Image: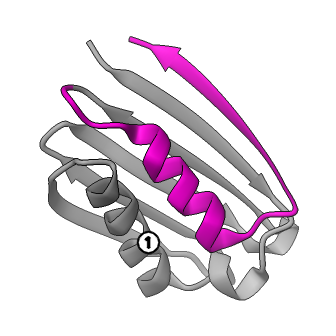
Amino acid sequence: MGKHYLLQLYGVDYDKLDNESYLRNLIEIAAETSGATVIQTISKKFDPHGVTAVSLLSESHISIHTWPETREAAVDIFTCGKCDPKIGCDVMIQQLEPQLHTLSYIER
């Protein structure tokens, strides 16, 4: 069916994790770099901090949930077809510059 990556990021800059427009743009870039087609992106900025952003893809979805107060984020990328979601994970790691991360893969 598809490829599903779960990325946990630790020790990320607070300002990046609390910037809604930056994160919306970042997940769209990660999706497109993976070879996916973004249909629509929605997001929610929480008070006092935190962001959730989700892009609906022709090939499935990509999402990020952030906890700036603990400098953590969770990313979920699921695609079918010829996309390579691992490339999107690499983009997220490169741009968010975590001190530590874990990456899990599920063949679906």
The quadrant of the picture occupied by the C terminus is: top left
Judging from the image, the colouring scheme is one colour
The percent coordinates of residue 86 (x first, y second) are 48, 39
Mark count: 1
Residue sitting at 21 percent across and 30 percent down? 82
Nearer the observer, 25 or 52: 25
Taking the image as shown, residue 93 lies to the left or right of residue 92, namely right
Q: Give above or below for 71 relative to 1.
A: below
Residue sitting at 12 percent across and 43 percent down? 58
The residue wearing badge 1 is 26
Q: Tell me the kind of residue under disc 1.
A: Leu
* Magenta residues (range): 81-108
The percent coordinates of residue 41 (x first, y second) are 25, 65
The percent coordinates of residue 90 (x first, y second) are 56, 53
Asked if residue 92 is among those painted magenta in the image, a careful observer would answer yes
Nearer the observer, 79 or 86: 86
Within the image, what quadrant is residue 40 found in? Answer: bottom left
Residue sitting at 76 percent across and 81 percent down? 14
Taking the image as shown, residue 87 lies to the left or right of residue 8, namely left
Within the image, what quadrant is residue 19 found in? Answer: bottom right
Nearer the observer, 33 or 46: 33
Asked if residue 17 is among those painted magenta in the image, a careful observer would answer no
Taking the image as shown, residue 17 lies to the left or right of residue 35, namely right
Q: Secondary structure at mark 1?
A: helix
The quadrant of the picture occupied by the N terminus is: top left
The percent coordinates of residue 83 (x first, y second) are 27, 36
Q: Give above or below for 56 relative to 29.
A: above
Q: Residues within 10 Å of mark 1 (few under 14, many from 20)?
A: some
Within the image, what quadrant is residue 95 found in? Answer: bottom right
Nearer the observer, 97 or 39: 97
Q: Give above or below for 83 relative to 1.
A: below
